[in-house]
């Protein structure tokens, strides 16, 4: 049994580490970009519904991405050794 555990390396999850480190910033950046897109749509003369849709999508995307980041943090807490 010792032969199997001698060279064992626990798996590394680089994608989880990236999401845990930058996930919240990415969520906020996405929401800010949607708000800026809404302002640009209003300024450029697009129909009003385009800007309103972008303004409504901003907090929704923030909420959804933050939920996904939270789930990744929970998964990482159970998978990754400390």
Image: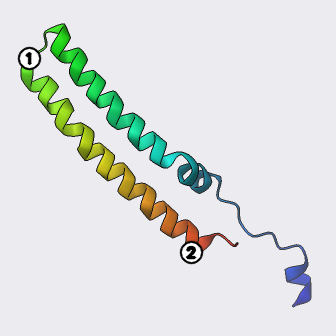
State left or right for residue 59 relative to residue 11. left
Task: Identify the residue position indicated by label 2 in the image.
Answer: 78
Q: Quadrant of the C terminus?
A: bottom right
Q: How is the image coloured?
A: rainbow
Q: Secondary structure at mark 1?
A: loop
Pinpoint residue 7: horizontal percent, then vertical percent. 89, 73
Residue at 16 percent across and 16 percent down: it is: 42
Q: Which mark is residue 21?
A: none
Pinpoint residue 19: horizontal percent, then vertical percent. 53, 51
State left or right for residue 60 relative to residue 30. left
State whether residue 58 is above or below residue 15: above
Q: Nearer the viewer, residue 67 or 5?
A: 67
Label 2 Cα crowd, 10 Å radius (few <14 / some 14-19 / many 20+):
few
State whether residue 59 is above or below residue 11: above
Q: Secondary structure at mark 2?
A: helix
Residue at 80 percent across and 69 percent down: it is: 9
Residue at 64 percent across and 58 percent down: it is: 13
State whether residue 2 is above or below residue 7: below
Pinpoint residue 81: horizontal percent, then vertical percent. 69, 73
Q: Which mark is residue 47?
A: 1
Please report whichever mark, 1 or 2, sits nearer to the chain's N-terminal start.
1
Q: Residue furthest top?
A: 44
State left or right for residue 21 relative to residue 5. left
Q: Nearer the viewer, residue 11 or 18?
A: 18
């Amino acid at each position: 049994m010792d032969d199997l555990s001698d060279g064992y390396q626990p798996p590394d999850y680089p994608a989880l580490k990236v999401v845990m480190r930058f996930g919240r910033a990415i969520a906020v950046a996405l929401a800010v970009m949607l708000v800026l897109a809404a302002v640009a749509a209003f300024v450029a003369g697009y129909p009003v519904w385009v800007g309103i849709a972008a303004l409504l999508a901003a907090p929704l995307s923030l909420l959804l991405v933050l939920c996904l980041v939270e789930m990744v943090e929970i998964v990482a807490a159970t998978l990754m050794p400390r």
